[in-house]
């Protein structure tokens, strides 16, 4: 077990601490240094406003989006995630580890649409119900955007406020997979991009099929390509890595 961390001051740290006494650095057991953690306080981003797409058959799309979310809240930006295709309490989705982590960190919130597992993949539940839930999630998306459009995104936002009162980063997790499964339409997603306020960073994830229909309207596209996956060996989601 590592012992207590010792504070050391480098020349750079001495210079920065003159301007901000909180900018001390901790020496880590591996021989490096890290800034001492500071309390998260609301701030506003200066370069947000892009649209990102994370698609592909490999593992890591939601994981990447969550990584960005936690990075953003570390800077004091307000983040919200709306999950399509996830959240059924009768499935493993009802106990996702990220939900506990999100609850412990100020500035990030989430909601899901209560799907009972993966449509057409794991559960075989009623198609009409899946269509209804996906369409409900799209209505919720538009309501969020209506509220966010009325907010001033170039100023700090209350980290515990309602997401309809404004967020700097909005993640629509698995929304593209909902399109692939024909639960919502391509035009639904394109209309979301069109409705997006200029300063809102929008992240869209999901789909194993290349979503070329929106490529001209987005700024960043990442194909998470599968080379090998545990699922192919019959190993389903594992606690702590997939949920």
Image (cartoon, grey):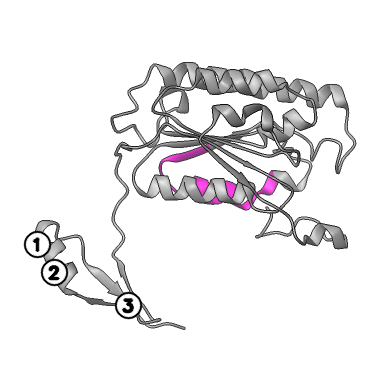
Residue at which label 3 appears? 5
Report the residue at 78% width, 41% height from top. Answer: 90
Classify mark 2: helix, strand or loop: helix
User: Is the Cβ of the residue at disc 2 closer than 8 Å to that at disc 1?
Assistant: yes
Residue 29 position (above or below residue 168): below
Q: Which residues are magenta?
A: 94-109
The verdict on residue 163 being magenta is: no
Residue 212 x, y percent position in the rendering: 68, 32
- Residue 72 visible to the viewer: yes
In the rendered structure, find residue 14 and report the number of the disc placed on it: 2
Is residue 94 positioned above or below 130 on the image? Answer: below
Nearest to viewer (mark 3 / mark 1)? 1
Q: Residue at x 85, y 42 (%)?
A: 121
How far apart in space, not on screen, are marks 2 and 1 (Cα)? 6 Å
Q: Residues within 10 Å of mark 2 (few under 14, many from 20)?
A: some
Residue at the outermost front position: 216
Q: Is residue 64 left or right of residue 34?
A: right
Task: Tell me: 73 left or right of 41.
Answer: right
Q: How many marks?
A: 3
Q: Which mark is residue 18?
A: 1
Quarter of the rendering containing residue 179: top right
Residue occupying the point 87% across, 40% down: 123
- Give the CA distance from mark 3 to mark 1: 22 Å
- The answer to whether residue 84 is seen in the rendering is no
Q: First in sequence: mark 3 or mark 2?
A: 3
Q: For residue 99: magenta? A: yes
């Amino acid at each position: 077990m590592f012992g207590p961390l010792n504070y050391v001051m480098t020349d750079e740290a001495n210079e920065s601490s003159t301007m901000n006494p909180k900018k001390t650095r901790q020496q880590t057991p591996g021989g490096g240094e890290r800034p001492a953690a500071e309390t998260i306080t609301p701030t506003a981003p200066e370069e947000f406003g892009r649209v990102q797409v994370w698609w592909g058959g490999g593992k890591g799309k939601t994981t990447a989006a969550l990584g960005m979310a936690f990075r953003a809240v570390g800077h004091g930006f307000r983040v919200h995630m709306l999950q399509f295709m996830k959240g059924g309490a009768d499935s493993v989705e009802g106990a996702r580890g990220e939900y506990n982590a999100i609850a412990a960190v100020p500035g990030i919130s989430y909601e899901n649409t209560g799907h009972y597992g993966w449509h057409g993949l794991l559960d075989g539940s009623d198609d009409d119900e899946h269509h209804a839930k996906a369409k409900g999630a799209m209505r919720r998306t538009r309501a969020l955007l209506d509220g966010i459009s009325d907010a001033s995104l170039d100023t700090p936002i209350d980290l515990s406020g309602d997401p309809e009162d404004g967020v700097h980063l909005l993640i629509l997790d698995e929304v593209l997979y909902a399109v692939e499964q024909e639960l919502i339409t391509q035009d639904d997603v394109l209309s979301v991009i069109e409705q997006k306020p200029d300063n809102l960073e929008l992240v869209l994830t999901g789909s194993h099929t290349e979503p070329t229909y929106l490529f001209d309207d987005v700024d960043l596209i990442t194909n998470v390509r599968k080379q090998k996956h545990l699922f192919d060996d019959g190993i389903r989601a594992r606690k702590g890595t997939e949920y």
